């Protein structure tokens, strides 16, 4: 692997505050998104992901002002997701300072949205936010969820990943809903399964608890590693994660 592995803190935002729970439930306040973004930028994060986790379930748009403030406080790429349902939404977020935009629920309901967005802005701006969990009813054993993991989409996660890339998605943020917030380690089987069917950059998310959890995710096929709990509550620093990756033989920035 020649490209550096990216380390990405994730800001899960609810009602204007960064929150974190386990499996997207029992949310605890973790701070101000603008302040945390600036902190992580200063600590050497390679990118930031800003997810308005209640936007789809509450049927509203991501707070544009907060995105603008967050983008203004950092000098690293910012991906924004939550409630993105149209080309106009993407345009609004890019104008507010986002570098990339994540889609989930709206693309599941109307897959052609992917093509519409990439035709207008290019596939480098579009990230598929794939919230998956184990589902014995799906051929691969992994199913897609929406609305912060609260709804089963009735889709096979591996097949959906393949289809989304065929439609033009430039990157996949793979979040294991079973592992999310548990700090028990990444779902390596899920990462391997998605990596086997797509050739776009893959971000592993969900389950990081210690520095040693990160290198196996890269070994399983991730190009970037994303975490929230361990960074927000200062269990780990960005530099500790990068050191663990470097010691495992993976290049970092």
Image (cartoon, rainbow, N blue to C red):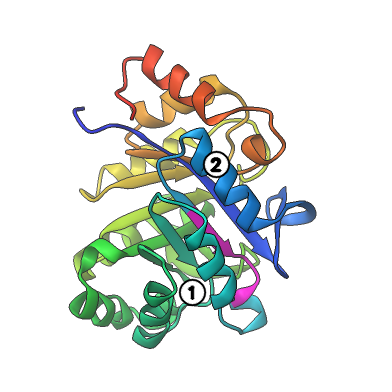
Label ID, residue 40 = 2
On the image, the x and y values in percent for residue 57 come to 64, 77
- Tell which circle, 2 or 1, labels the residue nearer the N-terminal end: 2
Based on the displayed image, in which of its 4 quarters is residue 16 positioned?
A: bottom right
Q: CA distance from mark 2 to mark 1?
A: 28 Å
As helix, strand or loop, the secondary structure at mark 2 comes to helix
Q: Mark 1 — residue? A: 105
Q: Taking the image as drawn, is residue 80 in sight? A: yes
Question: Which quadrant is home to the C terminus?
Answer: top left
Left or right, 28 with reference to 13? right
CB contact under 8 Å: marks 2 and 1: no
78, 128: nearer the viewer = 78
Vertical placement of residue 124 versus 187, above or below: below
On the image, the x and y values in percent for residue 189 come to 43, 36
Q: Which contiguous range is marked in magenta?
A: 49-55
Q: Kindly give the residue lying farthest to the top in the view shown.
A: 247
59, 78: nearer the viewer = 78
As helix, strand or loop, the secondary structure at mark 1 comes to helix
């Amino acid at each position: 692997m020649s490209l550096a592995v990216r380390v990405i803190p994730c800001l899960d935002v609810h009602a204007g505050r960064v929150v974190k729970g386990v499996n997207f439930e029992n949310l605890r306040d973790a701070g101000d998104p603008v302040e945390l973004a600036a902190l992580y930028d200063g600590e050497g994060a390679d990118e930031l992901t800003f997810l308005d986790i209640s936007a789809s379930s509450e049927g509203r748009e991501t707070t544009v002002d907060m995105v603008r403030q967050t983008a203004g406080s950092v000098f690293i790429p910012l991906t924004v997701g939550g409630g993105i349902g149209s080309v106009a939404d993407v345009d609004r977020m890019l104008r507010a300072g986002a570098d990339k935009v994540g889609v989930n629920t709206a693309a599941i309901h109307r897959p052609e949205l992917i093509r519409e967005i990439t035709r207008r802005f290019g596939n480098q701006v579009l990230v598929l936010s794939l919230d998956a969990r184990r589902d014995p009813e799906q051929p691969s054993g992994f199913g897609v969820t929406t609305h912060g993991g609260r709804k089963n989409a009735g889709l096979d996660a591996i097949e959906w990943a393949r289809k989304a890339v065929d439609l033009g998605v430039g990157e996949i943020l793979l979040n294991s809903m079973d592992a999310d917030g548990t700090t028990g380690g990444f779902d390596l089987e899920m990462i391997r399964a998605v990596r086997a069917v797509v050739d776009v950059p893959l971000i592993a998310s969900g389950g990081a608890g210690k520095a040693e959890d990160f290198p196996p995710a890269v070994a399983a096929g991730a190009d970037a590693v994303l975490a929230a709990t361990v960074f927000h509550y200062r269990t780990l620093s960005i530099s500790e994660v990068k050191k663990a990756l470097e010691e495992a033989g993976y290049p970092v920035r």
